[in-house]
């Protein structure tokens, strides 16, 4: 089989040229990084689980009318997605104070926020993804006011929907990060769509009863039972791979 063209390799995923123009194959790795690549490791089975979890969440979001880049899952570690131009902004939505917000303002982690807070970060490894305002985003041409309006409206809708979805399986959605892309339709029109992935790599999920962390913070903070936490999220969503937890290697290799 001919080798596929590798378009881009990120910290947790690889993008390959897709089978048709305008499509890409998104491959999920087991690699994990934290603190802008300073901490590196492997979470066995993470790629398989995140592929499933992200598929599930993107499909549920599409059902309520949120446009996404997701087309279909191809195998254990890959999904077919629409090729988009990634907006270089990470949109973080927070419901409870945690992580960098707890640090920045010296507020105890776990303090509920009276309303959801949306933050924007400029996607730049060299700069360590700095927090930016809407003014920076428009002044530097990273996105237009209309793009920001679209991303904000979608992010709040996604937050409401996912908060309920996770609560239904005993998980509190503390915060999460989204990425968006510009999709150019054949008509020449451009739409902002949800891209990247939604998984325990980019959400904070706490058990409703015990507040136990069920996400990448277990890796970032060396809390142990990292693989088990990702599996538990998938199990609660009802989407463990067919073979159960034993079937997480995901033998499809990167070609
Ligand atoms: P933070 O508290 O470290 O700013 O993270 C907020 C949320 O964004 C949290 O759910 C983890 C996620 N996140 C990413 O997905 N990628 C990143 O590079 C960072 C820093 C956070």
Image: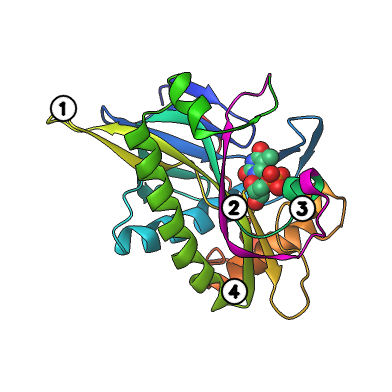
Q: Mark 3 near ligand 1 (CB under 8 Å)?
A: yes
First to last magenta residue range: 104-126
Q: Earlier in the sequence, mark 3 or mark 2?
A: 2
Q: Secondary structure at mark 2?
A: strand
Residue at image position (41%, 28%) is 143
Q: Earlier in the sequence, mark 1 or mark 2?
A: 2
The answer to if 32 sits in the magenta stretch is: no
Residue at image position (68%, 19%) is 126
Residue 16, picture quadrant? top left
Number of other residues with Cα within 10 Å of mark 3, as a class: few under 14, some 14 to 19, many 20 or more:
many
Residue highlighted by disc 2: 176
Mark whose residue sits in front, 4 or 3: 3
Residue 245, picture quadrant? bottom right
Residue highlighted by disc 1: 188
Q: Which mark is residue 217?
A: 3
Cα separation, mark 4 vs mark 2, equals 18 Å
**Spot occupied by residue 8 in the image (x, y as percentages of width and height):** 51, 23
Q: Mark 2 near ligand 1 (CB under 8 Å)?
A: yes
Q: Earlier in the sequence, mark 1 or mark 4?
A: 1
In this view, the residue in front, 254 or 234, is 234
Residue highlighted by disc 4: 236
In this view, the residue in front, 101 or 173, is 101
């Amino acid at each position: 089989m001919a080798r596929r063209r590798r378009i881009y390799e990120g910290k947790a995923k690889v993008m390959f040229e897709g089978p048709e123009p305008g499509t890409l194959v998104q491959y999920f790795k087991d690699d994990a990084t934290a603190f802008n690549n300073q901490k590196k490791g492997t979470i066995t089975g993470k790629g398989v689980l995140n592929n499933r979890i992200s598929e599930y969440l993107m499909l549920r979001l599409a059902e309520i009318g949120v446009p996404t880049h997701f087309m279909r899952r191809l195998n254990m570690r890959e999904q077919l997605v629409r090729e988009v131009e990634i907006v270089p902004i990470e949109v973080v939505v927070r419901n409870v104070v945690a992580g960098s917000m707890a640090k920045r303002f010296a507020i105890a982690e776990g303090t509920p926020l009276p309303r959801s807070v949306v933050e924007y970060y400029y996607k730049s490894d060299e700069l360590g993804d700095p927090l930016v305002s809407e003014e920076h985003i428009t002044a530097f041409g990273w996105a237009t006011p209309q793009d920001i309006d679209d991303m904000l409206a979608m992010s709040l809708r996604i937050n409401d929907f996912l908060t309920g979805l996770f609560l239904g399986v005993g998980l509190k959605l503390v915060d999460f990060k989204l990425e968006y892309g510009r999709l150019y339709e054949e008509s020449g029109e451009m739409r902002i769509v949800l891209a990247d992935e939604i998984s325990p790599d980019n959400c904070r999920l706490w058990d409703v009863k015990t507040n136990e962390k069920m996400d990448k913070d277990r890796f970032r903070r060396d809390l142990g039972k990292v693989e088990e936490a990702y599996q538990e999220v998938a199990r609660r969503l009802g989407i463990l791979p067919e073979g159960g937890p034993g079937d997480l290697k995901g033998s499809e290799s990167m070609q």
